[in-house]
Amino acid sequence: MSQVLSLLQKTHKASVQLRRINDEQLQKMLLMLADALEKNNHRILEANKKDLAKHDPGNPRNDRLMLNEQRVANIANAIRNVSQLPDPCGKVLEKRTLKNGLQLEKISVPLGVVGAIYESRPNVTFDIAALCLRSHNGCVLKGSIDAHETNKVEVEIIKNVLKENNIDEDCVALLPAERETVQELFTSTKYVDVLIPRGSDSLIQFVRKNSLVPVIETGAGVCHVYVEKDADLKKAVDIVVNAKVSRPSVCNAADAILVDKPVAKEFLKQLQPAFNKYSVEIFADANAYDLLKDYPHLQKATPEDFGREFLSLKCAVKVVDDIDEALEHIAEYSTKHSEAIVSENRQQCERFLQEVDAAAVYSNASTRFTDGEEFGLGAEIGISTQKLHARGPFALEKLVTEKWVVRGEGQVR
């Protein structure tokens, strides 16, 4: 029997115990996990340094991999927030008695075993484990080789806390980091109930095309900010800068800025100093290029640049005639993650919010808010861009399914 299959079988068996554990015990365990995380932060940071040492220090994607004391503290607080969320399982969703006397209840129950495949981002290890345990689900974690040293220490801490609380430590499993292990995960329909990929578009598409286990996509983010002609331009600059530079390596960062022609000259004039401060490289269409010709970090855009998730301090800019062209452009290039309009015209804002097909749509706010913790969901497994079961921040409330419970007194059909 392979190592992967053995781990999957153990997690599947351990997940049954989680269905019996009461809410108070799970809350206590998660609070202890948050404390243990802070107590062992030095071990986590040492392991994280080993992972970072494998990469070019100048790689902007290192931001996803890097942990520091503040980020560890944030993860611990997120776990505490998850512990305080209501138990999503055991809710009576529907209840009725049939004419033959059968008593029916539809209740929320755990999914069972959740598999997660993700790149870098060692914080995801704690997020997924905390959310799955809080919702009485086992979880199988397949992190990337980039963060393997960090992930090993993190899962060791999780398992120790589970043992201290008399919960089977096999409820959480870390698979070997080698990519080959995913093939066995893809075919383990008997032991894994749902698979969630989190990372690049290429990873997500690979999982979609190869997995026999049902997949919930957490999609890549090609996010737009549209500056409409009635926008408050100072507000627009602030929103665009925040959406692009506050954390450029994440999926809710802006990748393309659309601006109406009547305000394009003035808006881009105001945007340039702020972008230049962060050395943002702009890929501009012909009209924007003429308006930005003195900007030091300027490139002519190709059509492909408007469908790119840059994940760095790079951004596409396009001048559009009006909201109709903006909506057409977004429909063509959006990955249906997060889209924003900046305008003081309420009618145009409402039209944008109604017509744009995305998991999160904004008026006069940064796309950077698309996040489970920011939305008050405690944490997230990822941002789902599909339309089945879960959409948007995929968090505790969606880690359940339904079960019909039927109570009778000898009825036969």
Image (spheres, rainbow, N blue to C red):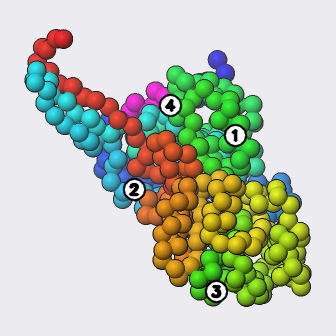
As measured in the structure, the alpha-carbon distance from the residue carrying label 1 to the one carrying label 2 is 33 Å
Q: Would residue 1 appear left or right of 286 to someone viewing this image?
A: left
Provide the residue designation for mark 4.
Answer: 193
Relative image position of residue 298 (x, y in whole percent): 88, 75
| Label 1 close to label 2 by CB (< 8 Å) | no
> Along the polypeptide, which appears first: circle 1 or circle 3?
1
> Which quarter of the figure has residue 337?
bottom right
Mark 4 or mark 2: which is in front? 4
Residue at the location (46% across, 42% down)? 389
Provide the residue designation for mark 1.
Answer: 205
As measured in the structure, the alpha-carbon distance from the residue carrying label 4 to the one carrying label 3 is 48 Å
Numbered disc 1: secondary structure = helix
Does the magenta portion include 193?
Answer: no
Within 10 Å of disc 2 (Cα), the crowding (few <14, some 14-19, many 20+) is: many
The residue under label 4 is which amino acid type?
A: Asp
Residue 200 visible in the snapshot: yes
The residue under label 2 is which amino acid type?
A: Ser
Does the magenta portion include 14?
Answer: yes
Provide the residue designation for mark 2.
Answer: 83
As measured in the structure, the alpha-carbon distance from the residue carrying label 3 to the one carrying label 2 is 41 Å
> Which quarter of the figure has residue 302?
bottom right
The residue under label 3 is which amino acid type?
A: Leu
**Residue interval drawn in magenta:** 8-19
- Residue in front for this viewpoint, 267 or 351: 351
Provide the residue designation for mark 3.
Answer: 233
Numbered disc 2: secondary structure = helix
| Label 1 close to label 3 by CB (< 8 Å) | no
Within 10 Å of disc 1 (Cα), the crowding (few <14, some 14-19, many 20+) is: few
Mark 1 or mark 3: which is in front? 3
